[in-house]
């Protein structure tokens, strides 16, 4: 089951559009511009993604801080932790 979940998460990240990202930003009270959303999704589409690896996540949030700001990256990291906890899948992200 965990392989299936990992594949679904990776697929969703790879298919994320700037408009979807802006929608999520609004939904979760983040402030990002359209240009930042485009840069973030372009970054996610061009790299090999492994959000289940703590080292990769640290690199990803550092890059997010570079594209936006540290506060936005910290908010995203906090939200990420809340979401995986709410779905009970913390064990996949260790």
Image: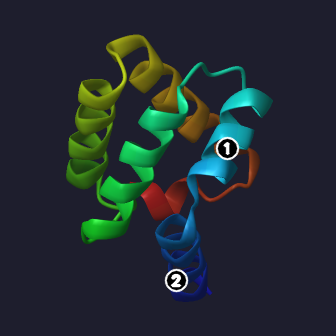
The reply to whether residue 84 is in sight is no
Considering every residue shown, the one lying at the far top of the view is 71
x and y percent of residue 58 in the render? 25, 40
Q: Is the residue marked by circle 2 packed among few (<14), some (14-19), or many (20+) residues within 10 Å?
A: few
Q: Is the residue marked by circle 1 packed among few (<14), some (14-19), or many (20+) residues within 10 Å?
A: few
SS at mark 1?
helix
| Structural distance between the alpha carbons of marks 1 and 2 | 17 Å
Q: How many marks?
A: 2
- For the point 30% across and 25% down, the residue is 65
x and y percent of residue 79 in the render? 60, 32
x and y percent of residue 9 in the render? 56, 70
Residue 1 relative to residue 92: left or right: right
> How did the renderer colour the structure?
rainbow
**Mark 2 lies on residue:** 7
For residue 12, above or below residue 59: below
- Whether the residues at callouts 1 and 2 have beta carbons within 8 Å, the answer is no
x and y percent of residue 52 in the render? 39, 62
For residue 79, above or below residue 52: above
SS at mark 2?
helix
- For the point 35% across and 16% down, the residue is 69
Q: In the rendered image, which quarter contains the C terminus?
A: bottom left
Residue 54 relative to residue 24: left or right: left
Q: Nearer the viewer, residue 80 or 73?
A: 73
Q: In the rendered image, which quarter contains the N terminus?
A: bottom right
User: Which label is found at residue 83?
Assistant: 1
Name which of mark 1 and mark 2 comes first in the sequence.
2
Q: Image quadrant of residue 74?
A: top left
User: Which label is found at residue 30?
Assistant: none
- For the point 57% across and 50% down, the residue is 18
The reply to whether residue 34 is in sight is yes
- For the point 75% across and 45% down, the residue is 86
Q: Nearer the viewer, residue 86 or 31?
A: 31
């Amino acid at each position: 089951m965990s392989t299936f979940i990992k594949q679904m998460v990776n697929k969703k990240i790879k298919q994320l559009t700037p408009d979807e990202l802006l929608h999520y930003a609004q939904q979760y009270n983040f402030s990002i511009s359209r240009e930042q959303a485009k840069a973030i999704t372009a970054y996610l589409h061009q790299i090999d993604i492994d959000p289940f690896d703590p080292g990769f996540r640290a690199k990803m949030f550092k890059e997010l801080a570079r594209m936006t700001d540290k506060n936005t990256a910290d908010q995203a990291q906090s939200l990420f932790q809340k979401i995986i906890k709410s779905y009970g899948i913390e064990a996949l992200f260790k």
